[in-house]
Amino acid sequence: MSTDHLAGQAPARVAFYNDPKIRSIIYQAALCAAVGFLIYAAATNAIDNLRRAHIASGFGFWDTTAGFDISQTLISYSSQASTYGRAFWVGLFNTLLVAGFGIVLATIIGFIVGISRLSKNWLLSKVATGYVETIRNIPLLLQLLFWYNAVLKSLPAMRESIVIPGGAFLNNRGLFMPEPVFQSGFGAVVAAIIVGVAASIAFAIWARKRQERTGQQAPVFWVVLALVIGLPFVVLALKGFPLTFNYPQAGRFNISGGIEVLPEFAALLFGLSIYTAAFIAEVVRAGILAVSGGQIEAAYSLGLRPRPTLRLIVVPQAMRVIIPPLTSQYLNLIKNSTLAVAIGYPDLVQVFTGTVLNQTGQAVEVVAITMLVYLTISLVTSLLMNIYNRRVALVER
Amino acid sequence: MTMAEGDLAVTELHFVRERAIEAQPPPAAMTGAVGWIRENLLSTPFNIALTILIGLLLLWLIPALANFLLVDAVWSGADRDACREIVQHREIGACWPFVWERLPYFVYGSYPIPERWRVDVFFAMLAVGVVWLLWLEAPRRDLGSAYFFVVVPVCSFVLLHGLPAVGLPVVDTVLWGGVLVTIVVASVGIVVSLPLGILLALGRASRMPTVNLLSTMFIEFVRGVPLITVLFMASVMLPLFVPEHLEPDKLLRALIGIALFASAYMAEVVRAGLQAIAKGQYEGAMAVGLKYWQMMRLIVLPQALKITIPNIVNTYIGLFKDTTLVFIVGIFDLLRTIEVSRIDPKWATPVTSTTGYAVASMFYLVFCYGMSRYARAMEARLATGDKR
């Protein structure tokens, strides 16, 4: 009855601008208008400014001959014949090269330092702490400049190269190493490696299934070692070692032959790995500390020995905590590799956003492409991360 | 032993002790310095090997550092000859006279010498603001934040840039340099990124679809690209986007880039804090009739910001280190003044670069380590606060 009465009454009068729904629409419309106006103003100004500077917008420059040299190229490139588009790919591959090596190296150093900080050895844990605190608090750019200008550039000159046993030379123009040359018949070795890896995976799956069924353990480690290392080596020996080395030859002014590692590459690799490793060490430490002591005590009380406890109880749980921040450290490493531009390593930013931009003046296009590349790497990585996270996330009852 | 004594002994023999034996001290090898060393340095063969290995490393590293920085260092001299092995015929460490002579340049850049007192006043004002904000027992901290976020920026601009109306001649930003620029870039980043970051975080948590979408897009975009590209965008693209007569000055462009970049990271830090606030707090605020902004200002943000202070400071550490990147777009921050000085023919020696980098490292180390200690102390303090 009373509801009828209420229903019959006109609703309380609220001014339309106090209605949350209408308000929200007004706010959003205002925001859209403001953002739209900003974009419109920026675009018209840009068109205006470009026309005044006589810069043709568009991606026509992509197929124009570049006309500049790049000191390190993983794919064929020449200043006379190659285009700006080709230069882009050269830069991208150089970025991926240094990032790939950097991630591996940073992970190794980071895990060692992170575990060292938790060591019972007082000296070791203090040294690891000192490493982390020092490296994390000095800007990466400064560290790169130090490695490049103070360490690598003060190595001896070409004439007085340091000779490293095994046929390598080290001087202020880089590290010159023997280059492996694959003779005919090496294909069989590659095939053996592939077969070995495939067989190991199959064996590991079979061993796991058998253990689940019967409880018997198979010597997986030794079998995998034999398949992955032993088999290719046997094939290599049977084929009569179809592998020779092209040794660098020291000339009067230059060194010819072999693989050359640029000092820029080395400085960037050292700097990035050592810097990122300090952050990875903290991630690893936090991950291990996140496994509660009760887990380890429970494992001991079930009769597991320290090593299986670490392998079966601590590491799997710690990895769940470690992997997400570890990925963001990898992303940081990739993004930080853009500091290459300060020491002249020809990465994507140095080649494309530096040289190509200066030569063509196509600021908008070039910066947009560069950003798109890094954005794609970031988004793809975080997508993979989310998938992984969903797989390992703790399933609560 | 006589018979009687033997009888007595038998009858009065106690099988239960009446008094406890005095506890014996632990073996000498388990206590004190020896025990500590056994426990912490030599517990297993592997540990012994590690201790020896690290001991050797330290025996090499510490004397090498001490030799370079102190023992072999050159303490006085007029030019590069003082720091050259060929001239001095001895092992040469750090070249301190180079730093000493270039120190004003490292601090002020090319800021005109008669006007440098203005920079000193700016440093002092900033220091007062920082202490006021960070020292939790300081009086009137609300005034402190008003001072830091309003008074300091306005006064600094007038002081550093100049205002002819009050008798301060204009100093073009091209002349600014060194620590001054590093501190200006860092403080602008700090002052702008917090409010902007809070706005973006609120935007991302908003239920209005366009606000949410735009904030999320901005945050994810900026966080997905390297700072260098943001700085390139600010320095080469920004001039295209504004009318020709409004072309912003070089330092301002870099400041915009840094501030936007830091805001996106700050937004994520604040968002984490917002998510950590119990839903009941929001509901309680709405139930007592607070409007959105009142709820945020009085209930949610004070709690969310309090628990995120350590992360905010960590973001500031990152920002402080990132200020070095303005070097790449041609601004004379501390690192660039060192880069320029170390190749100066007057001081060019094999040790000049390392000396310059050592000075820069110490500068950044002191600031960043100080901030991280503060963050950790806050964390410990908040942890005890939550225990109650």
Image: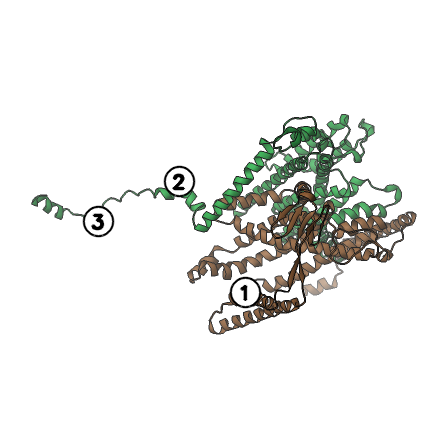
Q: Mark 3 points at which residue?
A: B16
How many residues crowd mark 1 within 10 Å: few (<14), some (14–19), many (20+)?
Answer: some
Residue at mark 2: chain:
B
Q: In this view, does B249 lie above or below A33?
A: above
Whole-Å distance between the Cαs marked 3 and 2? 35 Å
Residue at mark 1: chain:
A
Q: From the image, state the color of chain B.
A: green
Q: In this view, does A120 lie to the left or right of A240?
A: left
Q: In this view, does B64 lie to the left or right of B143?
A: left
Q: Name the residue under label 1.
A: A225
Q: Which of B200 and B30 is in front in this view?
A: B30
Q: Do labels 3 and 1 share a chain?
A: no
Name the kind of residue labelled 1 in the image: Leu
Nearest to N terminus: mark 3 or mark 2: 3
Q: Name the residue under label 2.
A: B32
Can residue B218 be seen in the rendering of this structure? yes
Residues at badges 1 and 2 in contact (C-beta under 8 Å)?
Answer: no
Q: Position of residue B59 (x, y in %)?
A: 52, 40
Q: Nearer the viewer, residue B148 or A392?
A: A392
Residue depth check, mark 3 versus mark 1: number of the one nearer the observer:
1
Residue depth check, mark 3 versus mark 2: number of the one nearer the observer:
2
Name the kind of residue labelled 2 in the image: Gly
Q: Name the quadrant containing residue A13.
A: bottom right
Q: Are marks 3 and 2 on the same chain?
A: yes
Q: From the image, state the color of chain A.
A: brown
Q: Name the quadrant containing residue A95.
A: bottom right
Q: Where is residue A62 in the image (x, y as percent from the top left)?
A: 84, 57
Can residue B319 be seen in the rendering of this structure? no
